[in-house]
Structure formats: C-alpha cells, structure tokens
C-alpha cells in the first residue's frame, strides 16, 4: 500500500500535536464565532443579544454567517500550525483540478442518497433540522450567501482540516506511518472526529460514513479536490431538497 508521503522523508508529521491543534482550533473557532455573533447582535441591536440568539430555533442569517466565519478562522489557525510547526507537508497536487473530477459530483449525490437509505428503515425524524436551523426563513440575497458558504466554502475548510491535516497526520505520522493499519486508523478516526464536530447526534452515522468516503478519496488520489467536490455535491443535494420543499412541490 502506497504511503501518502515520501518513504524517505526525514520527519513525519507530529500526530499528537496536530490533532490537538485541530481540537484547539475547533474550540477557538467556536469562541470566535460567538464573539463575531456578539458584535453582530450589538450592531444589529438584536433584542436580548447573544443569549437570545442562542435560544432561537432559526437565528438571523447574519448570525449564522458570522458563526461560520469564526469557526473557519479557528480551522485556519489549526491548518497553519500543522504546516508551520507540525512537520506536515502539503500534498504536491492537492489543489490540482482534473477534468475527471466531474465524476465526484455524482459521487456526492450518491453518498447523500446512500445516507438517506441508511436512515430510512429507522424512520428517523428531524434529520433536516440542521439545514432548517441554518436557513430558517431566510430568502433572497442572504439565502444565496448562505448557500455559497455551506455548499462551496464549508467543504473547502472542512476538507482541508479533517482530511488534508488530521487524516494525513494520523495516517502518515508516528512509527507506523503509511502502513495499512495507520491508514485505516486515520480514515476511521478522522471520520469520527468529523462527525462529532457537527454536534448532531442523529446525523453521526451518516456523517461518519461520508467521512470514510472522503478520507479514502484523499488517500487514493493524493489530492483534496476530489473530496472537496464530493462534499460540495453532498451538501448541494440537501440544499436542493430545501429549495424544492420551499417551492411547495
């Protein structure tokens, strides 16, 4: 089994430091998101301020947008640490786009339908809760902005952190870095962390399955674009379902 890194590399990624940086970056992003929302609530003179925002089922679009920006700032800090101090080297072709990448659009759609089928026998309700919470009663330009953030930007930042940094550190670092066992371990643990980070217990299983697919794509292709496109397509199906629902059909 091929390693994601050059077998002759002198230094392997610092696994524990990078994973901890990812955790700290995630927590820092949550804090920054709350601070950004606090500033937004103050500027918008939102009744009740941040405490009221935390209780509403459908926050204003600007609160969700600011929360995402804060979270991604934390992701960016963790990513920077991994490259600057964690001995993690960027994959040489991780941002290279290929014509065949259009295939991953279909893969993302297939993953969404597979996850839906996975839940179908259990008749689980409220699986669309996170989407409804994010978009609420938003329409117009703000609706389009949130679509751009969730379908285009979120997959880029999440794939960069969970697959481009955490998965690679787990699978490449340590004494057994690059072995079959370390790759399997990296796929499973990075997928679990990805699912847990969404803080949606009902969606854990589906997100875990998706995380496995996305990490496998990075390992097989040695690029981030395939997992990003698949993730974008996966999210896009959920948004398309919301738009269809709102259209009344």
Image (cartoon, rainbow, N blue to C red):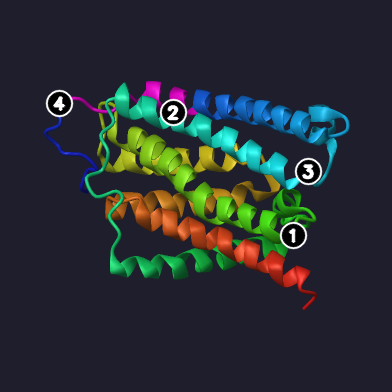
Q: Residue at x 45, y 24 (%)?
A: 21
Quadrant containing the C terminus is: bottom right
Q: Which is more N-terminal, label 4 or label 3?
A: 4
Q: Nearer the viewer, residue 98 or 162?
A: 98
Q: How far across and down, in percent of the image, does residue 81 sit?
A: 37, 25
Q: Which residue is mark 2?
A: 78
Badge 3, how many Cα within 10 Å: few under 14, some, many 20+? some
Question: What is the number of the mark on residue 180?
Answer: none
- Mark 2 or 4: in front is 2
**Of helix, strand and loop, which one carries label 3?**
loop
Q: How far across and down, in percent of the image, does residue 170 sit?
A: 36, 34
Question: What is the number of the mark on residue 59?
Answer: 3
Q: Which residues are magenta?
A: 11-22
Q: Which residue is mark 4?
A: 10
Q: In the picture provided, is 120 more to the left or to the right than 190?
A: right
> Where 25 falls versus 223 (above or below)?
above
């Amino acid at each position: 089994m091929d390693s994601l890194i050059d077998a002759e590399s002198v230094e392997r990624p610092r696994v524990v430091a990078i994973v901890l940086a990812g955790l700290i970056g995630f927590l820092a992003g949550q804090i920054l998101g709350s601070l950004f929302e606090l500033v937004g609530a103050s500027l918008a003179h939102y009744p009740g301020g941040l405490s009221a925002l935390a209780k509403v089922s459908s926050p204003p679009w600007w609160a969700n947008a600011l929360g995402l920006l804060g979270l991604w700032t934390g992701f960016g800090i963790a990513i920077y640490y991994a490259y600057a101090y964690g001995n993690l080297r960027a994959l040489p072709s991780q941002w290279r786009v290929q014509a065949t990448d259009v295939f991953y659009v279909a893969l993302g759609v297939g993953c969404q339908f597979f996850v839906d089928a996975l839940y179908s026998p259990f008749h689980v309700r409220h699986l669309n809760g996170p989407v409804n919470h994010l978009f609420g009663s938003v329409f117009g330009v703000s609706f389009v902005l949130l679509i751009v953030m969730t379908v285009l930007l979120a997959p880029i930042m999440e794939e960069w952190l969970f697959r481009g940094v955490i998965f690679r550190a787990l699978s490449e670092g340590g004494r057994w870095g690059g072995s079959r066992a370390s790759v399997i371990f990296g796929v499973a643990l990075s997928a679990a962390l990805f699912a847990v980070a969404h803080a949606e217990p009902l969606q854990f299983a589906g997100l875990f399955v998706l995380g496995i697919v996305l990490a496998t794509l990075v390992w097989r292709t040695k690029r981030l674009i395939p997992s990003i496109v698949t993730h974008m397509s996966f999210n896009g199906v959920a948004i398309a379902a919301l738009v269809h629902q709102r259209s009344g059909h």
